[in-house]
Amino acid sequence: MSAPDIKSAACGSSVAAPIRERGQHEVFCGLTSIIWLHRKMQDAFFLIVGSRTCAHLMQSAAGVMIFAEPRFGTAIIEERDLAGMADMNDELDQVVERLLSRRPDIKMLVLVGSCPSEVIKLDLDRAAQRLNKVHAPDRRVLSYSGSGIETTFTQGEDNFLTALVRDMPEKSETAPASLLVVGSMADIAEDQFTRIFSSLGLENVAFLPARRSTELASIGPDTKYILTQPYLGATVTELERKGATRIEAPMPLGEEGTTLWLRAIADTFDVQQDKFDAITGPGRERAKKALTHYREQLEGRRVFLFPDSQLEPAIARFLHREMGAEIVEIGTPFLHRKITQPEFDLLPDSVAVSEGQDVDKQIERCRAENPDLIVCGMGLGNPFEAEGRSTKWSIELVFSPIHGYDQAGDLAELFARPLGRRAVLEVAV
Ligand code: SF4
C-alpha cells in the first residue's frame, strides 16, 4: 500500500480571492483555551488576571471542577483597582506569593491577560519578569494574552505556545536533528504518534506543549517542526525566528490527512517508502474501515462552515475528500495562507472561502444556501437549530481526540451525529 501523494491528490488551489469581512463576529475569547491547555500541561497553573465575567466564563465553560486542586483560577480586578486606588502589581505579587506557597506542585505559573487587564494596560510581561526574579528557577512564570479583543478562542493556545517557544533553551551545535510536533493533541493521539515515530526509527521527537513544563525541548537550526493545529501563526513566526524549519503538510485529520502528514515527516528524515507503508498500513486500514461507516451519512451532504476554531479549512478538506461532502463555504477567522495551503491544494477551486466575519451577512448567505449541516460557534448553533437546521459546534473539535488514524472514525461521527439526530426528530414529528 502506498501513501497518497499531495501533488497527485490535488484538485486545485482555491483561496485566491476570499471574501474578506470585518464586521460583528461571534466567537469565544482566548481564555477558553485554558480549558484544554491546563489538562495538557500537568504542572502548570493558569492565573487569569481579569474580571468576574472572565471568572464566570471559565467556570461555566469548564463545567464542574473535578480536580482536588484546580489548575486555573482568576485574580479578580476589582473596582478600586480600576479606579487606581490600589497598586495592581503589588496585589498581583501577593496573590502569586499566596498561591505558590500553598501549591508546591505548580512548576510553571502562567499569567493570562484579559480584556480588562489590557484596557487598564497592566503589563503582564513585566510582571512575569519581576516574579521570575523571585521564583525562578524552581518555578517559572510566563505570560500571554487571552483577551477577547479582536481574537478568537484558539489564539489563546497560539499565544501560550509562542510564550513557551520564547522560553525554550537553545540547542547545542552538536545535538542531532530533531522533530518538534507543535499543537495540543489528546494524550491518546500523542501516544499513538509516539509509537509510530519510534517504529519509523525517529529518535529525537518532542511535543509542544510538553506534558510537564520541565520537559521543554531545546530548539535550533536542526529542529524540524510540524503543526498538528492550523491556528498557530504566531508560534510559527517565533519558531522560525529561533531557526527551526517547518515541515509542510495537511493537518493529521482523517486517514488521508494523517498519512500525508506522516509521509511529510518520513520524507524529511529519509524513511524508505516500503518501511513507511509497512508501519502505517494497519492504521490506514483501521481508519478507512471506521470512516466507511459514516461516509454513507455524509456523502453528498452540503456543509457550510462559519469562522470559529480556525480548523475550518482542515475540516472542510476532511469532509470533502474522505466523506464525500460538498463544501458550500469555508469561513475562517484568519487565513494563515502558508499553513493552510496544503489543505486548499486538496479542495476544489469552486469552494467559497471567507476570512473574518460580518455575522448577519454570513447568516443570510447560509440561509440562502440552505446547507444540510452548519459547523459554527455555540452562539449561532441554537438559533439555527430552532430554525430546523442541523449544526455542529466547532468548539467540540478542540475538546475531542480527533488526530490520527484511530480517531478518524470519531472525527467523522462528530459530523454524522447531528444529521442522524435530525433524521430521528423528523421521523418522531
Ligand atoms: S477576556 Fe474579555 S471576552 Fe473573555 S471573558 Fe474576559 S472580558 Fe469577556
Image (tube, grey):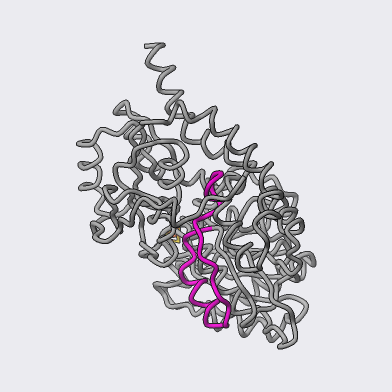
Q: Is residue 152 magenta?
A: no
Q: In which quadrant of this rendering is ligand 1 seen?
A: bottom left
Which one is nearer the viewer's eye here, 137 or 370? 370
The answer to whether 92 appears left or right of 5 in the picture is right
Q: Quadrant of the C terminus?
A: top left
Q: Looking at the image, which residue is at 54% across and 48% down?
A: 253
Q: Is residue 237 magenta?
A: yes
Tally of numbered tags? 0
Q: Looking at the image, which residue is at 57% across and 69% down?
A: 161
What is the x, y in percent for residue 135? 73, 80
> Which contiguous range is marked in magenta?
229-258
Q: Quadrant of the N terminus?
A: top right
The answer to whether 141 appears left or right of 13 in the picture is right
Q: Looking at the image, which residue is at 20% across and 41% down?
A: 364
In the rendered image, the vertical position of residue 252 relative to residue 150, given as above or below: above
Q: Quadrant of residue 138?
A: bottom right
In the rendered image, the vertical position of residue 223 relative to residue 379, given as above or below: below
What is the x, y in percent for residue 214? 75, 71
In the rendered image, the vertical position of residue 377 relative to residue 70, given as above or below: above
In the rendered image, the vertical position of residue 121 relative to residue 279, given as above or below: below
Q: Looking at the image, which residue is at 48% across and 46% down?
A: 395
Residue lying furthest top: 428
What is the x, y in percent for residue 128? 60, 79
What is the x, y in percent for residue 94? 65, 75
Residue 100 seen in the current view: no
Which one is nearer the viewer's eye here, 383 or 422? 422
Residue 101 seen in the current view: yes
